[in-house]
Image: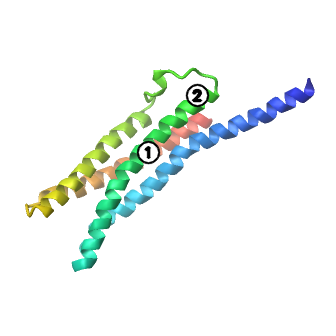
Amino acid sequence: MKERTQDLKRVGGIVEVTQAVLLLLHPIAALLVIREFSRQRKWRVISTTLKGDEREKALVEHERAGDLMLRYVIAVICLGFAARILSSYIDGHAIEPSLVLPGHFHGWAGILGLALMYYLWKQGRATSDAKSAGLKFARIKNLHGKVSDVMMILIAIHAFLGFLYLLQLIG
């Protein structure tokens, strides 16, 4: 009997480590995306110093990175949902539709952040399309930059709320 109890304690430790890893995947991935987002925002400074072919190459890279950024954000959000569902399953809870709905402000803010990221991406595409068509694009470009500024502030708040939520989960 004692031997079986020892086995259960070892399995329990593995389960706790698995849950901890699952819960940390989302914030670690989110930090990487935040780093990439801040790199992406440096375009506003870099774009004023580049000329000619060098600027065109950097612009193409900025647009490519913007397309990837939207995908990264979707992946991080899906990772957060998956971690929540798997962690609940490991705890022995039934998989229910309520697990998909965020039960806290951080989760709802993440969905709002996705909507804002999509809007930011659309503004970037609109800027590029207007420029390619030879239309005026300064207003769209400025709006794209201002939305990026607001997003950076909201991302910082969202990350802090996520940190508090993580402390609540592990505490």
Nearest the camera: 16 or 60? 60
Q: Residue at x 15, y 56 (%)?
A: 140
| Residue type at numbered disc 2 | Ser
- Local SS, label 1: helix
Residue ID for mark 1: 75
Tell me the kind of residue under disc 1: Ala
Q: Tag 2, which secondary structure?
A: helix
Q: Crowding at label 1, few (<14), some or many (≥20) Cα neighbours within 10 Å?
A: some
- The answer to whether any part of residue 123 appears in the image is yes
In this picture, is 170 found above or below 42? Answer: above
On the rendered image, what quadrant is the N terminus found in?
top right
Q: Is residue 99 left or right of residue 146?
A: right
Q: Is residue 56 left or right of residue 106?
A: left
- As measured in the structure, the alpha-carbon distance from the residue carrying label 2 to the one carrying label 1 is 20 Å
Question: What residue is disc 2 on?
Answer: 88
Q: Residue at x 8, y 61 (%)?
A: 136
Q: Is residue 78 left or right of residue 143?
A: right
Front residue (pair 28, 61): 61
Q: Is residue 48 above or below residue 137?
A: below
Q: Nearer the viewer, residue 105 or 54?
A: 54
**Crowd rating for badge 2 (residues with CA inside 10 Å; few <14, some 14–19, many 20+):** some
